[in-house]
Amino acid sequence: MDIRIGMIGYQFMGKAHSHAYRDIPFFFESKAKPVLKALCGRNIEAVKEAADRMGWESVESDWRELIKRDDIDVIDIVTPNHTHAEIAIAAAEAGKHIITEKPLALTVEEAKQMKEAVEKHNVIHMVCHNYRFVPAIQYTKKLIDEGKLGKIFHFRANYLQDFIIDPGFPLIWRLKKEVSGSGALGDIAAHSIDLGRYLVGEMDEVVAMSQTFIKERPLGEMSGGLSASASSEEMGEVTVDDAVAFLVRFNSGTFGTFEASRFATGNRNRNTIEINGEKGAIRWDMEQMNNLEIYLTDDQEGMQGFRNVNCTEEVHPYAGAYWPAGHIIGYEHTFIHLLYEFCEAIVNNRQAKPDFHDGYQNQLILKAIEQSAETKKWIDIPKA
Ligand code: SOE
């Protein structure tokens, strides 16, 4: 069955998604066949260039026209965060299935409207928390669900980057609250929150602090990936957090510790978790994403310690679709797995996870964190 995609946006995430759709049939057997039908963006010359390079059949310069097309089944939203809600709600009203980059929306209110729209129009919806789809993370989930780690005491997550440390790095959209919603919080801590909810369950309350180290920057725009250059000497105000840390009490009683920063010098994309349970523990680091350190308390005396498991053996989730054991996969494969699950959900007419409900719950947590940082108090986390 053809799944005809219309994607809005074509930069960093546009490339990740385009590549993933194309690679799905290489590695996964499925009734679903993603077709790169139309790519959309305001700068039509740039869109045409990107469409040619990435293999899209046609282009549009107005997302409303894209949504009207009856040869499109899916709207894929990889634009900055302030555009997600309007596009997703219109797409749901037009009966399109929807996948959107994270965080789901700019605010809790928008996230709620998006969730209500997809439910009302009965379309399939997903939000791109791609790190769930790393084989080592899927294997961790299996270990936890099978009780191999026992009761979980600690969930510890760091998401550390350093790409904006230079004061000359410009005021890109990711640093403007009205476009991005928040800073390190919504951009990268949102991923750690998703992993926490996926692996350990819902969160009940939170206490947080956040900081903005550089409050003014020269104006300028992204130039692809995470690179950017100043286009003027004029300065503008940074209106989001550069770093955030928070403690979470999970409903399960697990003690959660989180830190996210774009000022963690030397850390390019250090997304790590450590989970300590009564029967064992795991450690994982995205920069070595195929490896999972596993410790089990019942290992023989004298042999105890973290072992390094390379999650490329066929038994590991998704790994068997690729190469012989030991032949590693990378960042782009997380999107292949996520979009494969999305296409499978469409072709089998079932919901995919994480969905807009997860995105909305994530947004409620982001808001509680901001409230806590502002008021310097513990905040109860509402349930979606
Ligand atoms: C930039 O911080 C970024 O690309 C995020 O937007 C992604 O969600 C994260 O996975 C990698 O870093």
Image: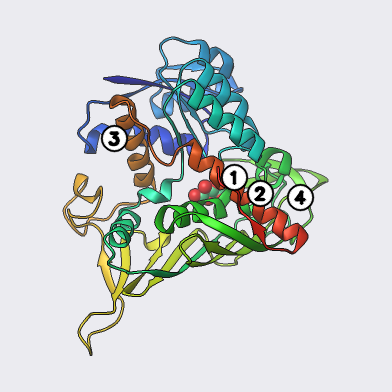
- Residue type at mark 2: give it: Lys
Label 2 with label 4: CB-CB less than 8 Å: no
On the image, the x and y values in percent for residue 212 come to 74, 59
Q: Tell me the distance, in whole angstroms, between the alpha carbons under discs 1 and 4.
A: 21 Å
Q: Please, what secondary structure does the residue beneath circle 3 have?
A: helix
Hey, which quadrant is residue 180 in on the image? Answer: top right
Quadrant for the C terminus, please: top right
Alpha-carbon distance for marks 2 and 4? 19 Å
Front of the two marks 1 and 4: 1
Mark 1 touches mark 2? (CB < 8 Å): yes
Query: What numbered label is drawn on residue 238?
Result: 4
How crowded pointer 4 is (Cα within 10 Å; few <14, some 14-19, many 20+) is rated as many
Residue 214: image location, x then y, percent = 76, 58
- Lower position in the chain sequence, tag 4 or tag 3: 3
The numbered mark at residue 363 is 1
Badge number at residue 367: 2
The answer to whether marks 4 and 3 mark residues whose Cβ atoms lie closer than 8 Å is: no
Mark 4 secondary-structure assignment: loop
| Residue picked out by circle 3 | 24
Look at 56% across and 57% down and name the residue there: 204
